Amino acid sequence: MYAWLNTLPKAELHLHLEGSLEPELLFALAERNKVALPWPDVESLRKAYAFHNLQEFLDLYYRGADVLRTEQDFYDLTWAYLQKCKEQNVVHTEPFFDPQTHTDRGIPFETVLSGIGQALEDGRRQLGISSGLILSFLRHLSEEEAHKTLDQALPFRHAFIAVGLDSSEKGHPPRKFRQVFDRARAEGFATVAHAGEEGPPEYIWEALDLLKVKRIDHGVRAAEDPRLLERLIDEQIPLTVCPLSNVKLRVFKDMAEHNILRLLEMGVKVTVNSDDPAYFGGYVTENFAALQESLGMTCEQAERLAQNSLDARLV
Ligand code: HPA
Ligand code: ZN
């Protein structure tokens, strides 16, 4: 079954490039850039990957991203992810990156973008993987900060397909970013947002009604609100679900409790994604395989999930 899932053509619509930083590359970049790490070796870093919630994970994720300093580093990170896509027959990807994580540490916006952009271009030409880049605003910061990030992106408008919203969800509702999303849409960006991972269904309503998103990232807590489910089904709004992430961050107690196949059978346009594969135990195929092992996903369901991901592309 794994081999069959692996060869199924798929799109990935929820992937944080910084979350695809494998421990081996993290250590190699730390050495290249002379960054001191709090872990003596790769094994002890892997042992540190035991999170109980989103915030615990994010603390490590931002710590890990600190080894990314040069254009070459961002190229290598993105290229390594695209190699994985090739191995797993991910034919299209729409990754996120968090510019402010890097610009706040003094790395120019252009350095980050050109490393990522060059790798995506090489991925198109050399690997045949199509892609579109999504700029994410950090929701634990102010809307003012997001406006500044958008200002930096505007000279490179055509490098992006959309803006998104990530990081710590609880206490940072989508409504906080209404104006910056209005501005981004006026500049021609599509919009997406993380909502309904740890946050309540109300955040999904806000993402739809105030931020006018084309997809909801995660969205699994929509299951708590029948009216919302009805809307997601009626309007066929895609959810970019990340099963291994949801179990690692305890959104669900274990994979057997995950609701993705129930949502699929109700007619919600759910897709399977890896979120932060270097931290959560696998790439897209591993996420599909986990659904097969724990929920008895059939081949027909896997084909529908893969087709949903191809249909839910923004470009
Ligand atoms: N949720 C929110 N923000 C994130 C995540 C996530 O899973 N990964 C990286 N930033
Ligand atoms: Zn995410």
Image: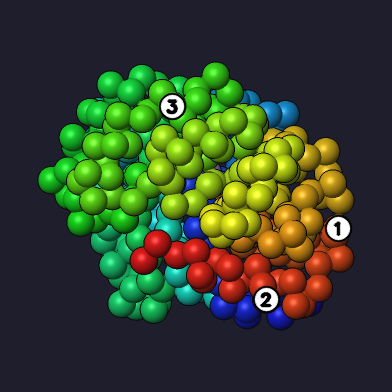
Q: At 61% from the left edge and 60% from the top edge, which residue is drawn?
A: 269
The residue indicated by pointer 2 is 303
Is the Cβ of the residue at disc 3 closer than 8 Å to that at disc 1?
no
Disc 2: CA contacts within 10 A as few (<14), some (14-19) or many (>=20): some
Q: At 23% from the left edge and 51% from the top edge, which residue is drawn?
A: 188
Percent x, y of residue 171: 55, 19
Q: CA distance from mark 3 to mark 2?
A: 35 Å
What's the coloring here?
rainbow
Q: Where does the C terminus fall, quadrant-wise?
A: bottom left
Percent x, y of residue 245: 66, 45
Q: Dividing the picture into quarters, in which one does residue 283 lie?
A: bottom right
**Three-letter amino acid code at the position of disc 1:** Ser
Q: Nearer the viewer, residue 114 or 12?
A: 12
**Three-letter amino acid code at the position of disc 2:** Glu
Q: At 26% from the left edge and 61% from the top edge, which residue is drawn?
A: 118
Q: Please report whichever mark, 3 or 1, sits nearer to the chain's N-terminal start.
A: 3
Q: At 66% from the left edge and 73% from the top edge, which residue is drawn?
A: 304
Q: Please report whichever mark, 1 or 2, sits nearer to the chain's N-terminal start.
A: 1
Element at badge 1? helix
Q: Dividing the picture into quarters, in which one does residue 219 lie?
A: top right
Element at badge 3? helix
Percent x, y of residue 105: 31, 27
Residue 60 lies left or right of residue 151; in this view the side is right
Disc 3: CA contacts within 10 A as few (<14), some (14-19) or many (>=20): some
Is the Cβ of the residue at disc 3 closer than 8 Å to that at disc 2?
no
> Residue 294, which numbered label?
1
**Three-letter amino acid code at the position of disc 3:** Arg
Q: Nearer the viewer, residue 139 or 31?
A: 139
The residue indicated by pointer 3 is 175
Q: Residue furthest left?
A: 155
Percent x, y of residue 312: 50, 64
Residue 245 lies left or right of residue 105; in this view the side is right
